Amino acid sequence: MKKEIIVAGIRASGKLHIGNYLGALKQFVELQNDPAKDCYFFIADLHGLTTPFEPSDLSKTILDVTAAYLAAGIDPDKCVFFPQSQVLEHAQLAWIFNCLLPLGELERMTQYKDKARQHKENINAGLLTYPALMAADILMYKGEAVPVGEDQVQHVELARVVARKFNNRFGKTFPEPKTFLREPLRIMSLADPDKKMSKTPHQSLRSGAGQAGDDGCIFLDDTPLEIHRKLKKAVTASESGKKSPGEENLMLLLAHFGKTDGIRHFTEAQNSGTLKYSELKQALAESISEYFTPFREKKKELLARPEYLARVLAQGAAKAAQIARETMLEVKEKIGLV
Ligand code: TRP
């Protein structure tokens, strides 16, 4: 039986938080373990160049994300795991797609409009043609299903447009990939539970309040001490008569990270109106700390072996490149470049 081809890119932009874990990493591990699926997971380092970065941080960030994915259970023997920039064909196919995509289609992408607004000083062309590269990432491996968050759905739709255009003009080559919307899971900020948990502090963006935003976010690397401190401060207040969004968020986290007994206990307390936030926060901090103990240890071990990480990435890139070369040969033949 033919396996379903899954392609997903990982944006390597620093520290991962528990929302990223539940919304992406955990699902990737499940997909890789499904024998009916053939998975390509890559670090979208070329896409990373579209927003401001420091050259001295870039390779460190890539190794850090690699260690995090491996520590979370990504197994390079069960999927193809590689950095996008090491498979040269991605940029080449992206160029060909750039020449097929009408400018208007790119200009109406919401992410482009948002980012152009956010980074006024750096509205580079890569920001605009981002979806052409993303289409290349997916179609290179003839990806059929693309697990992404809601913000990327429009880009996957554009990949379908590209596939259709290419097929119509040059003959059937690519499948039209469908989005595989990740569980619409909304883990909210602990400090500001009306906003999504995010590594960019919401407050500090506006007022330069620094630390405050970070306290809303539990990173996978946080020590138990930090996890306890952040949860202790978690906002649970509600407007009178309304449900507390902070409480809902903590209960959602408990459902994912808690033990069966704890979940039952606090759900009952919630239903009978006897829920004590301090107890819930304490139990949740313990559960989250414990849940990620093996992750923290594994990641530390991996980071101590940067040559090993580099080797994993290079081997993944070599596997991906075999397929990429075949696709490019087919593409070039179809468009008359060879
Ligand atoms: N743009 C995606 C994101 O921000 C990352 C990405 C790049 C991607 N190429 C991809 C996702 C291809 C899925 C398929 O999350």
Image: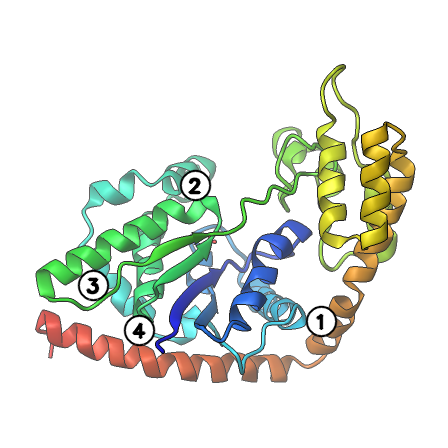
Q: Residue at x 19, y 68 (%)?
A: 173
Q: Which residue is mark 3?
A: 96
* Numbered mark located on residue 311 in the image: none
Q: Which residue is mark 4?
A: 89
Secondary structure of the residue carrying tag 3 is helix
Q: Is residue 275 left or right of residue 46?
A: right
Secondary structure of the residue carrying tag 2 is helix
Q: Nearer the viewer, mark 1 or mark 2?
A: 1
Secondary structure of the residue carrying tag 4 is helix
Q: Earlier in the sequence, mark 1 or mark 2?
A: 2
* Label 2 residue near ligand 1, CB within 8 Å: no
Q: Is residue 184 visible?
A: yes
Q: Residue at x 9, y 60 (%)?
A: 169
| Distance from Cα at disc 2 to Cα at disc 4 | 26 Å
| Ligand 1 placement by image quarter | bottom left
| Distance from Cα at disc 4 to Cα at disc 3 | 11 Å
Q: Which residue is mark 1?
A: 299
Q: Position of residue 205 (x, y in %)?
A: 61, 34
Q: Is residue 66 left or right of residue 269?
A: left
Q: Residue at x 12, y 77 (%)?
A: 333
Q: Which residue is mark 2?
A: 115
Q: Is residue 303 left or right of residue 1?
A: right
Q: Residue at x 56, y 80 (%)?
A: 310
Q: Quadrant of the N terminus?
A: bottom left
| Distance from Cα at disc 1 to Cα at disc 4 | 30 Å
Q: Is residue 99 visible?
A: no
